[in-house]
Image (cartoon, rainbow, N blue to C red):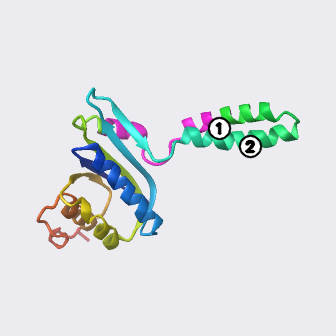
C-alpha cells in the first residue's frame, strides 16, 4: 500500500527542488515513488499541476510506434502512424495514474499565490536515510497531509517544520 504525503512551501522553487531530490533518492533505491506532482498557484490565482510525466505525449509516442507497426503490416504506414498517435494521445490524456488531479487542484486552491505543494505517493522508503538526505529542507515548509504512521509523520514534521517534537514524544497508538 502506498502512502500519500503532501508538503507545502511558500515559494515554487522549493517544491521543484524537493521533487528533484526525491527523484534522485528513487534512482538510488532509497525510495519508490508512484507519483510526484508539484502544484503551484500563480499571481492570477490559477492552480497548475506539474506532472513528472506527460501522459498525453507518452501515449502519442507509444501509439505512433504501434500504429506504424500495424500500418506496415497493412501497407499504409503513414495512416497507421497518424491513427496510432491520435489514439495513444487520447488514451494518455484520459489516464490518471497516482494522485487524483481534481483532489490536487482543490488543495492547491488554498495556496497563496507564488506558493507550491508537493504531492508524493510513496510505495516504499528507507525512512531514516531519506530523512537524512532531506536535511536541506529543514524548516522550509509544512506538512499538510500524510497517511504515514504517527511516528513517521512526527519525524517528517520535525524535519520539514523544524519543531521541537521528537518522534519519541508522539503518543503510541492504542493497541
Q: Is residue 172 magenta?
A: no
Percent of width and height locating residue 143: 24, 53
Q: Is residue 94 magenta?
A: yes
Tell me which segment is drawn in magenta: 87-107
**Can you identify the residue that label 2 sits on?**
66
Query: Would you identify the image quadrant in which residue 55 lies?
Result: top right
Percent of width and height locating residue 80: 78, 34
Q: Can residue 167 be seen at all in this image of the molecule? A: yes
1 and 2 marks in contact (CB < 8 Å): yes
Q: Can residue 123 be seen at all in this image of the molecule? A: no
Percent of width and height locating residue 148: 31, 61
User: On residue 75, which mark appears?
Assistant: none
Q: Is the stretch drawn in magenta largely helix, strand or loop?
A: helix
Q: Residue at x 23, y 68 (%)?
A: 174
| Mark positioned earlier in the residue sequence (1 or 2) | 2
Quadrant assignment for the C terminus:
bottom left
Q: Is the residue 88 above or below the residue 119 in the image?
A: above
**Can you identify the residue that label 1 sits on?**
88
Q: Residue at x 37, y 59 (%)?
A: 21
In this view, which residue lies farthest toward the left?
A: 164
Q: Residue at x 28, y 66 (%)?
A: 152
Amino acid at each position: 500500500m502506498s502512502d500519500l504525503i503532501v508538503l507545502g512551501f511558500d515559494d515554487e522553487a522549493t517544491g521543484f527542488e524537493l521533487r528533484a531530490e526525491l527523484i534522485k533518492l528513487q534512482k538510488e533505491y532509497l525510495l519508490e515513488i508512484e507519483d510526484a506532482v508539484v502544484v503551484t498557484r500563480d499571481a492570477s490565482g490559477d492552480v497548475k499541476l506539474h506532472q513528472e510525466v506527460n501522459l498525453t505525449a507518452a501515449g502519442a509516442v507509444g501509439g505512433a510506434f504501434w500504429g506504424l507497426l500495424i500500418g506496415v503490416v497493412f501497407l499504409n504506414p503513414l495512416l497507421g502512424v497518424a491513427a496510432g498517435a491520435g489514439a495513444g494521445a487520447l488514451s494518455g490524456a484520459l489516464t490518471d495514474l497516482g494522485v487524483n488531479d481534481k483532489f490536487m487542484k482543490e488543495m492547491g486552491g488554498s495556496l497563496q499565490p507564488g506558493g507550491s505543494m508537493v504531492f508524493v505517493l510513496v510505495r516504499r522508503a528507507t525512512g531514516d536515510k531519506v530523512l537524512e538526505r532531506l536535511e536541506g529542507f529543514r524548516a522550509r515548509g509544512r506538512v499538510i497531509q500524510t497517511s504515514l504512521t504517527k511516528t513517521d509523520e512526527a519525524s517528517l514534521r520535525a524535519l520539514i517544520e523544524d519543531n521541537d517534537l521528537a518522534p519519541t514524544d508522539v503518543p503510541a497508538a492504542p493497541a
